[in-house]
Amino acid sequence: MIHFEWLWALAACPLPWLAHKLPAISPHNQAALRVPFIEDFQIDQPSKKVMSTKSWPFYWAVIAWCCLILAGIRPQWLGEPVEMAVTGRDLMLAVDLSGSMEEQDFLIQQKQVDRLTATQSVANQFITRRAGDRIGLILFGSQAYLQTPLTFDRQTVMTLLSEAVIGLAGESTAIGDAIGLAVKRLRTQPGNSRVLILMTDGANTAGVISPLKAADLAAEHQLKIYTIGIGADEMIVRSLFGNRRVNPSRDLDEKTLKAIAEKTGGAYFRARNTDEFNTIYTLLDELEPIEKDKQFFRPKTELYIWPLGLSLFLMLLIVILKIKNR
């Protein structure tokens, strides 16, 4: 169907008529010369053929003005309504930036990297696949702060996550505060679509609220939390006395992370290497999406270009004819 976007432009239709009817304003008084033998200065009237030829520019100008007005009201062709896919979840990622995240116990392309680098690499792949979800980002250390509010702009979330550095939020770990901040940001969203993915490599050592208390608060607001414990179970450390095996994840509080997940109806995962990290995010990809209110849009095709083009063409003809008749 045809739709006109700016019908108020029709008010400009009588402008040429008004300009013609308004009295001409001249800065100087004009003197009249009376000639008693005026008949001698009479000019023969042009023939009907000539008169008809000279009237064509007037008609062209009228048509050009009408076409210009038609272009001004912006005609559009509206197609059939198309349903937009707006299904998905409101996902909040909480990433630990405490000092322990600098432990280099992950391998990416046969290169030793720290835990944050591995988290950023795998999480960015996960974010890329979450088309249709709104994603937010919380970074926490000694304090927790919102880096990115919920948004469909996944590229911005990935950029800000990649720019995060260890120690940016302090050297300690405030798991409870990170959960509390997620509850605050997600509590106004639909109850069955609130999800927090919490990634940490340690235990709660800072903050004003305990992780279990924050988990109870999350459960009250129907926030489902998936916790991921980051870090290898063992690694070889070279020293003056030879090589020895150590557990770099000895500070990881798996008991608390499991309790948080159980209280909120989520699950706990262990990421000892990048392969397990990828497996975890593949499982998270299988979260059942929640349908939201359907939205529709109608594709629009702009048609103003045609009357505008015709108007410009007629005006060009009028100019050419004026120049030719000089």
Image: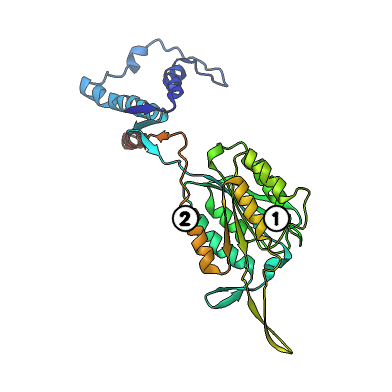
Q: Is residue 291 visible?
A: yes
Which residue is disc 2 drawn over? 129
Rounded to the nearest whole Å, what is the CA distance between mark 2 and mark 1?
24 Å
User: Which of the two discs, 2 and 1, labels the residue nearer the N terminus?
Assistant: 2
Tell me residue 194's x, y (percent).
Answer: 57, 43
Res 136 visible: no
Answer above or below: position of 30 versus 103.
Answer: above
As drawn, the residue found furthest toward the left would be: 49
Closest to the observer: 202 or 90?
Answer: 202
| Residue at far bottom of view | 241
Q: Is residue 37 above or below residue 144?
A: above
Residue furthest to the top in view is 36
* Circle 2: residue type: Arg
Badge 2 crowding class, 10 Å Cα cut-off, few under 14, some 14 to 19, many 20 or more, is few
Question: Residue 290, percent across and down?
Answer: 47, 41
The residue at the point 48 percent across, 52 percent down is: 130
Q: Residues within 10 Å of mark 1 (few under 14, many from 20)?
A: many
Asked if residue 67 is positioned above or below residue 265 in the image, the reply reads: above
Q: Report helix, strand or loop for mark 1.
A: strand
In front of the other: 296 or 121:
121
Q: Position of residue 100 (x, y in %)?
A: 71, 67
Q: Quadrant of the C terminus?
A: top left
Left or right? Give the position of 202 relative to 297. Answer: right
Q: Which amino acid type is shown beneath numbered disc 1?
A: Phe
Q: Where, quadrant-wise, is the N terminus in this rendering? A: top left
Q: Secondary structure at mark 2?
A: helix
Q: Is residue 57 left or right of residue 269?
A: left
Color encoding of the figure: rainbow
Residue receiving disc 1: 140
Vertical order, 162 against 14 (above or below): below
